[in-house]
Amino acid sequence: MPLPPLPRILLTQDPHAELSSPAFLRVQRVMLRASFPDGEQSEPFSYDIVDRERLDAVVIAAHFRDAKGIRHVYLRSSVRPPVALRSRVASPLPERDDLGNLWELPAGLVEVDERSPEGLLLCAARELQEELGFEVDPRALAPLGPSSFPAPGMVGERHFFFHVPVDPSRRAAPTEDGSVLERKATIAALPLDEALALARSGLLEDEKTELALRRLAELDS
């Protein structure tokens, strides 16, 4: 069961549009000094750290079993500007024509008032409805392994992983969050082993998605 084609959403920079909102990300340049276990201290050195008000994110694997008992998982197309605008000249390998368009599990940022175990469940349930169209009881969501740092050399963001069984017949239209990048996404369900095969082949390039899929597969082992 191959995935449908990714929607070819093309991003271009508009040099004439004015930036009317404050920056979403902040870059802090700090001066650091390392203290080693033997008592030695390093010379001062500078380091750039990316920060934002809503720092962490949830990742959700929504899954079901078909009549044969085969576990399926839902993926959603997404366009990511940093990838879409990546320099092809600087890439050590040829890039795909649909660069920037990815298959991902639903995910989203944790709001300031959701910084608690209960808040994470509320956040995951909200994102599931926004991105897939499933309305679930937050208490039905279960952890999918521990949290992890996706890019610790640049940002202190944690990813919190959850999974939940869903009924495909109860999926409605995603509510979305109102942003341009959530419009006209393609949603697909495919067997979990096929999703993992796509990750191994390089056709599913999102790291958090592959990690969650591998953890989901471990539930059956």
Image: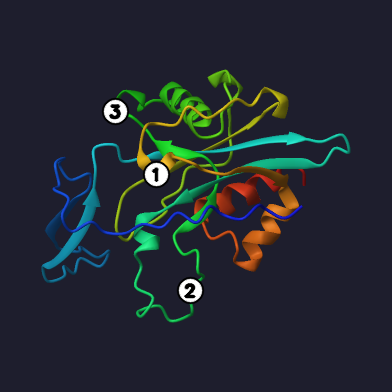
Q: Name the residue under label 2.
A: 95
On the image, the x and y values in percent for residue 3 come to: 67, 53
Horizontal side of residue 136 vs 33, given as left or right = right
Residues at marks 1 and 3, CA–CA distance in whole angstroms:
22 Å
Say which amino acid is labelled 2: Glu
Mark 1 or mark 3: name the one nearer the start of the chain.
3
On the image, the x and y values in percent for residue 26 come to: 18, 49
Label 2 environment density (alpha carbons within 10 Å; few <14, some 14–19, many ≥20): few
Q: Is mark 2 on a helix, strand or loop?
A: loop
Q: Give me the disc on residue 181.
A: 1
Q: Give me the disc on residue 200.
A: none
Q: What element carries label 1?
A: helix
On the image, the x and y values in percent for residue 206 come to: 51, 56
From the viewer's perspective, is the residue at label 2 or at label 3 nearer?
Answer: 2
- In this rendering, the answer to whether 11 lies above or below 212 is below
On the image, the x and y values in percent for residue 103 come to: 55, 52
Residues at marks 1 and 2, CA–CA distance in whole angstroms:
21 Å
Of residues 108 and 175, the one nearer the viewer is 175
- In this rendering, the answer to whether 168 lies above or below 204 is above
Q: Name the residue under label 3.
A: 112
Q: Is mark 3 on a helix, strand or loop?
A: helix
Mark 1 or mark 2: name the one nearer the start of the chain.
2
Of residues 131 and 141, the one nearer the viewer is 131
Horizontal side of residue 121 vs 163, given as left or right = left
Say which amino acid is labelled 1: Leu
- In this rendering, the answer to whether 160 lies above or below 9 is above
Residue 186 visible from this viewpoint: yes
Residue 177 position by quadrant: top left
Direction right: furthest residue? 68
Mark 2 or mark 3: name the one nearer the start of the chain.
2
